[in-house]
Amino acid sequence: MRAVIQRVSQASVTVEEKCVSEIQSGVLVLLGVEEADTQEDVNWLAAKIANLRIFGDEKGVMNVSVKEADGDCIVVSQFTLHAMTKKGNRPSYIRAARPEQAIPLYEAFIHQMEKVLGKKIGTGIFGADMKVRLLNDGPVTLIIDTKNKE
């Protein structure tokens, strides 16, 4: 799994001109699922994101997690995170999982994030043409890949 995590002051997802998710302070997670991903990747990534210390403490130092800050979360599926661009100018998405494998793992990740954060989280709609708006706070943007746990 590959995730782009953005600390946001606000974020929303719109599908066909209808807002399907909206949050204030928290994290927007763009999530790409690849064929080799398993429930182990889901569990590790959800725990990592929930506990990343990317919010300011009373001194303004990034020392508080979204969980500790009681922040909100939106998770949006994004297969393009697994694009391969080595050859030519047209990205290849061959490493991205097909919907029959990606949807259950995407849903498992959502449920795991809700479990870890102890609250309902927002989502996009898998496979839909989504418009994602965000006000990146900081800006703080991190990229995590479960196959390269750095």
Image: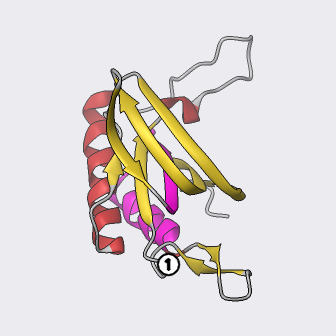
Where does residue 149 sit, x and y in percent of width and height?
61, 63
Looking at the rendering, which quadrant does residue 148 occupy?
bottom right
Looking at the rendering, which quadrant does residue 99 occupy?
top left
Q: How many marks?
A: 1
Where does residue 55 sit, x and y in percent of width and height?
62, 73
| Of residues 35 and 111, the one drawn nearer to the viewer in this rendering | 111
Q: Can see residue 37?
A: no
Q: Is residue 32 left or right of residue 17?
A: right
| Residue at the image point whose x is 27% and y is 54% from the top | 108
| Residue at the image point whose x is 60% and y is 54% from the top | 6
Q: Is residue 50 above or below residue 21?
A: below
Where does residue 140 sit, x and y in percent of width and height?
69, 58
| Residues rendered magenta in the picture | 25-50
Where does residue 82 sit, x and y in percent of width and height?
56, 34
| Mark 1: secondary structure | loop
Q: Can see residue 60?
A: yes
Residue tagged 1:
69
Magenta region includes residue 32: yes
| Residue at the image point whose x is 57% and y is 35% from the top | 81
Say which amino acid is labelled 1: Ala
| Of residues 88 and 51, the one drawn nearer to the viewer in this rendering | 51
Task: Farthest residue to the bottom: give it.
Answer: 58
Look at the image and tell me in which quarter the C terminus lies. Answer: bottom right
| Residue at the image point whose x is 57% and y is 58% from the top | 9
Magenta region includes residue 11: no
